[in-house]
C-alpha cells in the first residue's frame, strides 16, 4: 500500500488495459484504489506465478497471476495479467 514505492519503481505514464478498455494515469499509484480494495475485504496479495513471455534489450513481457486475500488468508479473488515493461532510456544511452 506504499504509493510512493509504487511510483518510485515505475515511470510515467502508467497505462492499463483491461478488456479492451485502456486508461492512462500520470502515476502507477493513481491506478490503484487501496481504499476500495480494503472495503471489499482485502488484506494482502500474493504472487502465485510469474513467467517471462518475451525479452529483448529494451522490452519484456511477463505473465503473472496473483491472488487477493482477506482475513484468515481466505482467497477473495484471483487475477492474471500480462505486464509490458520498457527500459527507460536515459540521455546518452
Image (cartoon, helix red, strand yellow):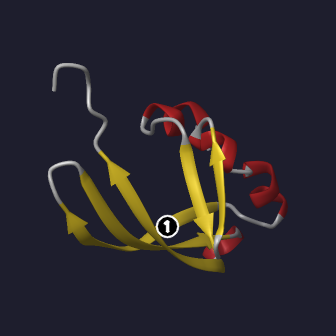
Vertical relation: 57 (above or below) 74:
above
User: Taking 37 as reference, is 56 left or right?
Assistant: left
> Which residue of the protein is positioned furthest toward the right in this rendering?
39
**Near-viewer residue (86 or 30):** 86
**Residue pictured at 64% horizontal, 73% vertical:** 20
Give how far across and how far down residue 30 sits, in percent. 68, 41
Vertical relation: 8 (above or below) 68:
above
**Residue pictured at 59% horizontal, 64% vertical:** 17
Q: Indicate the quadrant containing the C terminus: top left, top right, bottom left or bottom right.
A: top left
Give how far across and how far down residue 74 sits, in percent. 65, 79
Q: Quadrant of residue 73?
A: bottom right
Count of numbered labels shown in the rendering? 1
Q: Quadrant of residue 42?
A: bottom right
Give how far across and how far down residue 71 sits, in percent. 70, 69
**Residue pictured at 61% horizontal, 70% vertical:** 68
**Near-viewer residue (29 or 35):** 29
> Which residue of the protein is positioned furthest toward the top in this rendering?
92
User: Taking 10 as reference, is 33 left or right?
Assistant: right
Q: Residues within 10 Å of mark 1 (few under 14, many from 20)?
A: few
Vertical relation: 78 (above or below) 28:
below
**Residue pictured at 49% horizontal, 67% vertical:** 46
Q: Indicate the quadrant containing the N terminus: top left, top right, bottom left or bottom right.
A: top right
**Near-viewer residue (22 or 32):** 22
User: Taking 52 as reference, is 66 left or right?
Assistant: right
Residue on which the image places disc 1 = 46
Give how far across and how far down residue 63 sits, in percent. 37, 73
Q: Quadrant of residue 49?
A: bottom left
Q: The residue tagged with tag 1: helix, strand or loop?
A: strand
Amino acid at each position: 500500500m506504499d504509493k510512493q514505492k509504487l511510483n518510485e519503481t515505475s515511470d510515467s505514464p502508467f497505462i492499463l488495459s483491461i478488456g479492451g478498455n485502456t486508461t492512462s494515469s500520470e502515476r502507477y499509484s493513481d491506478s490503484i484504489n487501496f481504499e476500495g480494495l480494503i472495503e471489499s475485504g482485502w488484506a494482502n496479495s500474493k504472487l502465485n506465478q510469474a513467467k517471462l513471455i518475451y525479452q529483448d534489450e529494451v522490452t519484456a513481457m511477463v505473465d503473472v497471476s496473483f491472488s487477493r486475500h482477506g482475513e484468515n488468508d481466505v482467497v477473495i479473488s484471483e487475477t492474471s495479467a500480462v505486464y509490458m515493461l520498457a527500459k527507460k532510456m536515459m540521455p546518452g544511452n
